[in-house]
Image: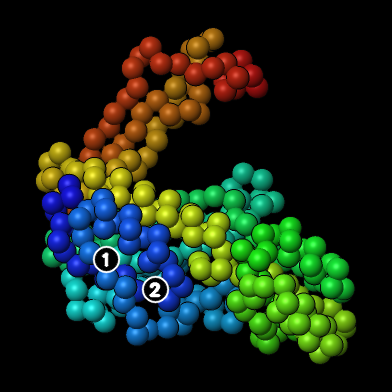
Amino acid sequence: MSSRFKGQKIAFLTQHGKETVLKPAMDSALGCDVQHVSGFDTDLLGTFTRDIDRAGSQTNALRKKARKGMELSGLSIGVASEGSFGPDPFTGMLTWNVEQVILIDDERGLEVTGSAQMVARCGELLAETWEQASAFALAHGFPSHQMVIRSQKKNVCTFYKGIYDWTTLETRFKEAHKASADGKVWMESDLRAFANPTRMENIRRATVDLLKRLKSECPTCSMPGFWRTQNLPGLPCRGCGAPTHLPRGEVWKCVWCTHSDTTFKPSTDTAEPKFCQVCNP
């Protein structure tokens, strides 16, 4: 698999330090040379501080970044990274970070995307005192995880980003508190990659997932990206034999040709009764 990209230059447009985790992983696994590309403000595609809303989906922004990096560098292969934050899919009470890393190869007509998701290290608070502000910052990983301060409310566009030390945090808080009409200061975690080590680790994990997909080649056309696209539920209960929601098989598809495979677990595989709606309704 590594020989497919060995010695090839791959464009990576980023201004938030993501190359520090992506380049070593890809260069080592593929034998390629990921080239850091600049010359375009990726914040124009959307920011987490909401001063610029992202137009379109996470995947659309991902493709735009990869294409822009390829355009600026003149290279035919590009990678890009894009993240999103929202409620967790289990309880809806925690902030959930989904990271995607894409590789686009125009020489081969190939597009492969890796992803990773996890609970985010972030928070937000409307603070009235420095004691509240400092306690919040400490609880959310400051100073390794940087902070953003707004002068009044969530939707006010005047803010300070990239706060990474206690002296600056206190100074900015007091300035914002003095300027605030209601004596309250909005604080939140800085979610840019270089400012949030937890997010950076998730980007690394998404890169690893991309590399796993690139290692998986289609048995028909030998192109990278042959991967699981669907789980088939119905693994029988060990106690009563009724189908459960656990997967009994998987569907694998090629991202380049139309080939797909369906695989099933051995007939001896069963689910614990605790997962059965009949035995454990």
Q: In this view, does 2 lie above or below 103?
A: above
Q: Residues within 10 Å of mark 2 (few under 14, many from 20)?
A: many
Question: Is residue 258 visible to us here?
Answer: no
**Nearer to me, 244 or 11:** 11
Q: Amino acid under label 2?
A: Thr
| Residue drawn 57% across the image and 20% down it | 276
| Residue drawn 19% across the image and 67% down it | 9
Where's residue 223, x and y in %?
16, 49
Residue picked out by circle 2:
14
**Nearer to me, 189 or 235:** 189
Where's residue 211, x and y in %?
30, 50
- Report whether 263 appears left or right of 180: left
Q: Is residue 175 above or below residue 114?
A: below
Which one is earlier in the sequence, the residue at label 2 or at label 1? Answer: 2
| Residue drawn 18% across the image and 50% down it | 2
**Nearer to me, 246 or 148:** 148
- Report whether 185 appears left or right of 37: right
Element on which disc 1 rests = strand
Quarter of image, res 39: bottom left
How many numbered marks have been drawn onto this rendered protein structure?
A: 2
Q: Residue 34 carries which label?
A: 1
